[in-house]
Amino acid sequence: MSEWLEKQLPKLVLAPSFVAILIFVYGFIGWTAWVSFTKSKLLPRYDIVGLIQYDRLFVSPRWDVAFSNLFIFGFLFIVISMLLGLLLAILLDQKIRTEGIIRTIYLYPMALSLIVTGTAWKWILNPGLGLEAMIRSWGWESFSFNWLVDPNMAIYTVVIAGIWQASGFVMALFLAGLRSVDDEIIKAAQVDGIPKWRIYLSIILPSMAAIFLSAFIVLAHLSIKSFDLVIALTGGGPGYATDLPATYMYTMAFSRGDIGQAASSAMIMMAVVFAIVVPYLYSELRAKND
Amino acid sequence: MNTKLLIAATAALTISITSIAKAEPQAEVLHWWTSGGEAKSVAVLQEEFSSRGGTWTDMPVAGGGGDAAMTALRARVLSGNAPTAVQLKGPAIQEWYEEGVLADISSVANAQGWADVLPASIAGHMRCEGNWCAAPVNVHRIDWIWANAAVLAENGISMPASWEEFNAAATKLKAVGITPLAHGGQAWQDATIFEAVALGVGGPEFFHKAFVELDEDTLKSDTMKAVFDQMRTMRGFVDSNFSGRDWNLATAMVMNGEAAFQIMGDWAKGEFLAAGKRPGIDFLCASTPGDGFLYNVDSFAMFDVDGADKEEGQMLLAELIVGKNFQKVFNMNKGSIPARVDVALDDFDPCAHTSAQDMATSNAGGSLLPSYAHGMALRGAQSGAITDVVTAHFNSDMSSNEAVDMLVSAVANSM
Amino acid sequence: MTKLNSKYADSGYIQKLILRSLLFLLLGIFAVYYLMPLFIMVTTSLKSLEEIRTGSLIDLPREVTFTAWKTAWSGACTGIQCEGLRPFFWNSVLLAVPAVFISTLIGALNGYVIAQWRFKGANLIFSLMLFGCFIPFQVVLLPMARVLGIINLAGSISGLVFVHVIYGIGFTTLFFRNYYVSIPVELVKAAKIDGANFFRIFISIFLPLSLPIIVVTVIWQFTQIWNDFLFGVSFSEAGTQPVTVALNNIVNSTTGVKEYNVDMAAAIIAALPTLLVYVVAGKYFIRGLTAGSVKG
């Protein structure tokens, strides 16, 4: 009896989490799918009427903007945060004495919620109050930085603030990666007279593949969930130029009492997540199954 | 003998019921009035409530004009833990009623004779299928235009009586380097200007057909195109940094003479007064050009709750909210006017007097209209769809024809 | 050979100096980028309202005053009660500490099972959990509210702890699994031969090895939970609202004069615990990541 228990114990330990995830993630996704086929308004209703919410979603010009913003924002946010994080990590890895302080400065934005820093960013990016006004007051009269108030450029200010928050964290990931590369290999390469940039490019970076993937997952997760960022910085404006699927869904569900519509947008969002995450998991776990 | 026993038992039962009904009133109140002046105004209600033996539990959730509070409300209702009283307004009251979660407060309303002291159109918002289901707090007027008195005087401009006059004045101001219109580019502020323009350009009947009845022919009419044309003209009168600006910062621009006009509800008055500016001397208030009166009535709805103490709390709260004292004190703080018409306005400022008089005349003339931009005329999905078009038009170079087409399809798609 | 080198020593030294200065210049520029918002928040919180209204936002305060900080902590109105952030701070502590502890413990056990006691389907379960990290929280609000009502945790701090633990499992499991997977399985085999059981091995072998990854997990979870607004506002009631909800009430008032200095001070106060955690534990954070994610 106790032998059986001992054998099953690992499964029993994992079971509660498994059940919880099944109910609270997959059950709720199922619930959302169901609601997306209903005409739920203020509160959820459960009588299925078909694909009407998806029809509405696909003709909505606002959803078009939100959906394409997800790709603009997501792509730039992930790529630039990665590159910047990597660059900073390499710079910091040059045996800097003040590394502790600088690292903390780069890392701290992750500790703050954007409800907090949104106002400060709004001021900095506002042409009349922040950067533009400051540089003009220094004498560069023609300096212009008005992305925040330009409907075509505003999404890029969201990218700037997003990178500000996350790139330090990515730097930490890469720094950890750089630190754990075997010193012996690097020393050997140096003895052979291989230039430093070649060492990074062909020895160190390839050995950090796992870190790239971890960083990608963290960033992808942040970009899909970006909500506070938009609300605090632009409120979705000018117009709805900086709307993202998460803010679209929230607006529909909670300020417009259109829960069916919100559910359909959530399902599309989940589909995008699925398309991004599943290939990653596949490659990641196949590699592990050695 | 048996009947005697029955009577005695009934009497005992009645006594016990009344004693339950006299339980100490309890109220958990969900609202989004958290800033200094508003919070003080709500505190007046809390004090009255306590002095009548009640216990008030405060549940404030600010942000997004109540969006965050509505999120909390949905979660609370779904978890079977609804707050006692909730700040709700407009058709949302009826929407919640249809979900079957609102309590009936007719007994208080009838006892207090609300029907006699509230303007009929406002009372209509407080009724659900004949029952009273909400208590009105105030009447905000939306279609106000505020101006810096000194700036107007220096440039020889008087308060505009028509949109042509406004355009002429604005052009003149722009030429001398003053921002004609202080505006914050947030969707709800764009919508606020839009509805004031729609009322002025199209008139009350047009407004009602378009934004209350959602009549398709009106939505795509030439008048609607003219409204969008005027919006395009107005776009030229705002400064280049207007996007995302909070409304109070726009008010500050008028105050310090950077800008001349602002179109905003009467909560802007509170900003002027708080900065020590005097109505009629430092700043001017007038209705936006055209007839009519757009109102935004804040109110509290009572949710279905269990427990005699909470139900007692709801009745007491409803009574106090519509009570003369609270209506006066609260609205003097908030910049609005009382919802009930029998409150003496002697201590109110001249702008409030204008508002009250206009409300009476519009009520009589049938041009007392609910604000669409502030969620009084339409349900969330429809008003939101209209606002999407308005703000997209204002923040791009979309033509009026395109805007009207978008408007029709957006409204149809929101149903 | 050495002679040859010394010939170039001077120019090499100068080149190195230039590179070094360039390096610090770059690091400095980025430091400015990262510090700018914090700088503005701190300076604004130290200004008087009058100075904010009249001066430039980016200037240093002419006169430093701490009244805004005092107001934010104990006097700002978050509704009709004007007691500042203080009463809500404690709610957040009561909520974050157990939620972080429980989710870290669960993550450790899950990671231990998935990495070291592999059984058929373990990887599938792990993928399912990982995918769960990506569910947007707006999606779960309404059904979760229903569930909390059914299990009678609506409006309570326990309910909030429950929610945060559930949605923390994905990340905590990920962290621990990636850390434990680099520990050779022979360790468990040897311990089993010595007669140690499942929990014994976990407690006396794995836990002592886990400090770096515990630090990482605790930092991550604490940041997420402390900064959460959406769950906090939806699943609390009067008396259980966390500090982010109070902060939002102070910052996001819809009408009335905006006291930016109080807003900023409140924002910094609300963020102090997470900031402190990053500053104090930042060093271990890198170490933990170094130990954890690389070989994973």
Image: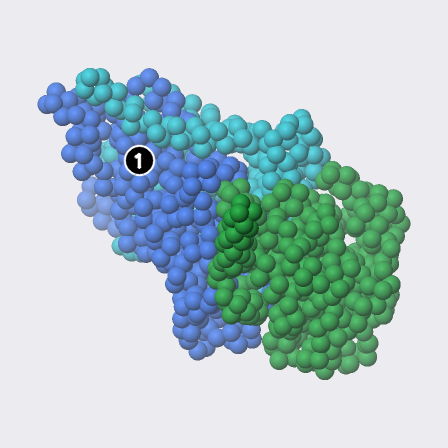
Q: Nearer the viewer, residue B374 or C235?
A: C235
Q: Tell me the residue at 68%/48% (across/down).
A: B94
Shown in cyan, the chain is A
Instruction: Give coordinates of residue C180: x percent, y percent.
Output: 26, 31
- Is residue C67 visible in the rendered image? The answer is yes
- Residue under circle 1? C106
Q: Residue at x 46, y 55 (%)?
A: C238
Vertical order, B362 against A266 (above or below) = below
What colour denotes chain C? blue
The picture quadrant where one finds residue B117 is bottom right
Q: Position of residue B397 (x, y in %)?
A: 76, 50
Would residue C255 appear left or right of A207 to someone viewing this image?
right
Name the residue rendered at 42%, 62% in the picture: C85
Q: Is residue B125 above or below residue A244?
A: below
- Residue at 50% across, 32% down: A28
Residue A185 location, quadrant: top left
Q: Is residue B70 left or right of residue C250?
A: right
Q: Which residue is situated farthest in the right direction here?
A: B222
* Residue A71 position within the rendered picture, expressed as x and y whole percent measured from the top left: 57, 37
* Residue C69 shows up from this direction: no
Which lettered chain is shown in green?
B
Q: Using the image as rendered, state which of residue A39 and residue B232 is in the foreground.
A: A39
Q: Residue furthest left?
A: C194
